[in-house]
Image (cartoon, rainbow, N blue to C red):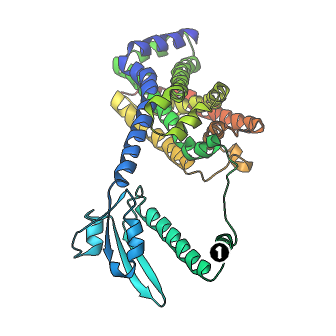
Amino acid sequence: MKHILLKEILELMRDKKALFVAIILPIILFPIILVAMSFFTSQAIEEANTNIQYKVLNAELAPEFLDGLKTQPDLVESDIALTDLRQQILDGDVDMVLEFATQGESIALNVYYDKTNRFSEGTKIVKDQVAAFNERQNLMVLESLGLSSDKAKASIEAIAYQSKTISSTRSFLGEMIGGFLFFIILMNIISAGLALAADVAAGEKERQTLESLLIAPQSRVTVAMGKWLALCAFGIVNSTLTLLSIALLGMFAVNVLDVPEVTAMLNSIPLSSYALALLLLLPLIGFVNAALLAATSFASSFKEAQSNGSFVLIVFMMIGVISMQGLFELSGVYAWIPVLNISLSVIDVIKGEFALSHLLPVLLSNFAVLVLVLAATVGIYKRESVMLAS
């Protein structure tokens, strides 16, 4: 088995494409994605909240309020003529339309805006200004009736509501982006595994070197295990480099990311957490590469192998997408569901909330599935009709 393992590793190391996908890509992919997302998100937020154009209807009903609104630096009153309110907002000709109307003794304010422009803070600014204006008006009325300023404020706000979270920045942001981080790691494992599995399985058929390997004096089990171990070796290197790139990005993110909260969260993850995440990923690496080796072994060409492996990619991608939704917690039956429990475990590690009591069910369930998939892969290598098909 050692000779098969070394042979496959040496052959894969000669393949520049395989080396790029398995080793170079994980180092640069995650930093590029996170930096790009940070840059474009900050640009979108800045653009959406600079010179927010608003149009006022029936301005004569609230002149004092509008005078205060004009002091807001990010709001600009538009002089556009409204012909089709809805379409002009959707087209971006104006961001908001403020319509005042009489409502008994008070004045109603209807704010029309495009909800799909989720980065815009225009409606929040208007809402805050309305609340501040109402408070000032109520204070003036109550003080005119002889109440002191403190009593007037207490009568307006009998209970002052304040919410104070007890969760740490790491826990809060880990909940938000932990699933995304796992998804990136998972995609790195699968993309690298697919490229390498296609080469060691179908690639050998194309090069017509598989026959000589199969008739050599070693069992088919040894051949299959040697190829699988070679794939796992590259998978472990791939995952280690991916986690290392995340750790290094956390150390230097303050210089490249315009998101201080994410920087603080990445900096708060200790090296021991990355080591634990790698341990949890080991059965996943074995499982993924065994499934890819089995799928690509049915192919007679590199192109066909990539097509077969795409089915495995889709299955694991769906699991990765589900884990990003935050719908499940690592407890009860979910701690025993293979692959899903690994994603939940890695998210908990990122949040700093992983309980070691979950380590046993996570590893046992995934190693059990790994053994079954690996047995199926070995069975495929024992079938002449599959391995010698052209």
Question: Considering the image in quadrants, where does the N terminus appear?
Answer: top right
* Circle 1 SS class: helix
| Residue 26, percent from left and from top | 46, 26
Q: Which residue is rendered at x = 41% and y = 41% of the image?
A: 37
Above or below 185: residue 105: below
- The answer to whether residue 338 shows anywhere in this view is no
- Residue with the mark numbered 1: 152
Disc 1 marks which amino acid? Ala
| Residue 16, percent from left and from top | 36, 17
In depth, the one of 379 and 103 nearer the eye is 103
Question: Considering the image in quadrants, where does the C terminus appear?
Answer: top left
Mark 1: few/some/many CA within 10 Å (<14, 14-19, 20+): many
| Residue 329, percent from left and from top | 67, 49
Q: Which residue is rendered at x = 46% and y = 63% of the image?
A: 124
- Total of numbered circles in the picture? 1
| Residue 61, percent from left and from top | 38, 82
Q: Which residue is rendered at x = 41% and y = 25% of the image?
A: 21
Left or right placement of residue 30 versus residue 50 in this view: right
In depth, the one of 126 and 67 nearer the eye is 67
Left or right placement of residue 173 versus residue 10 in this view: right
- The answer to whether residue 6 shows anywhere in this view is yes
Quadrant assignment, res 385: top left
Q: Which residue is rendered at x = 54% and y = 33% of the image?
A: 288
In depth, the one of 342 and 262 nearer the eye is 262
In depth, the one of 12 and 137 nearer the eye is 137
